[in-house]
Amino acid sequence: MEKSVYLAGPVTGLNYEECNNWRAYAIGELAKSQIIGISPIRFKEHLNDGRIILDSDNTLLEGDKGVTLRARLDIKNCDLMLANLLRTKEVSKGTMIEYGWADAFGKPIISVIEKERNVHEHPIIRELTGFRVESLEEGLEVVRKILSY
């Protein structure tokens, strides 16, 4: 049975490349261990035209309902969540909601976040975090160690 990890992180105010680069890297690295990385912006390559992702047309998967329903279903069906919060400039409301969903569904959360001074630093996020690391590489290593046999 294949294992999967939801790749949470800021989208608001970012373009496709800014949202996708770390996720594409993570998906490739996880695939080497037969782990599926689930990106909330998969099948949205048509947004790779420089525009800000959440400012796109209100189409099927980019509209409010599509973004919400798919993210919640992805988190419900994954084995754990990896949240990359590095170098964020403002709080990602969507990612914070994803933390709540992951916790409600009993999914372990790995937070990739600076040691201090990240805008997401909050008692609830610290409490919901199962593993806190300071680099994406460390986060991917924790995922592999949890999900590989």
Image: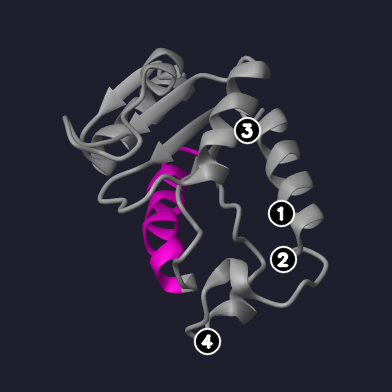
Identify the residue under disc 3: 2
Q: Which of marks 1 and 3 is in front?
A: 1
- The amino acid pointed to by label 3 is Glu
- The amino acid pointed to by label 4 is Asp
Q: In x, y percent, where is residue 131?
A: 34, 19
Q: Nearer the viewer, residue 34 or 129?
A: 129
**Residue segment shown in magenta:** 17-35
Precedes in sequence: disc 2 or disc 3: 3
Q: In x, y percent, where is residue 140?
A: 34, 36
Q: Magenta stretch mostly in which secondary structure?
A: helix
Q: How far apart are marks 1 and 2 (CA)?
A: 6 Å
Q: Nearer the viewer, residue 147 or 54?
A: 54
Q: In x, y percent, where is residue 129?
A: 41, 19
Q: In this view, does 34 lie to the left or right of 89?
A: right
4 vs 65: above or below: above
Q: Residue 62 carries which label?
A: 2
Identify the residue under disc 4: 49
Precedes in sequence: disc 1 or disc 4: 4
Identify the residue under disc 1: 67
Element on which disc 3 rests:
loop
Precedes in sequence: disc 4 or disc 2: 4
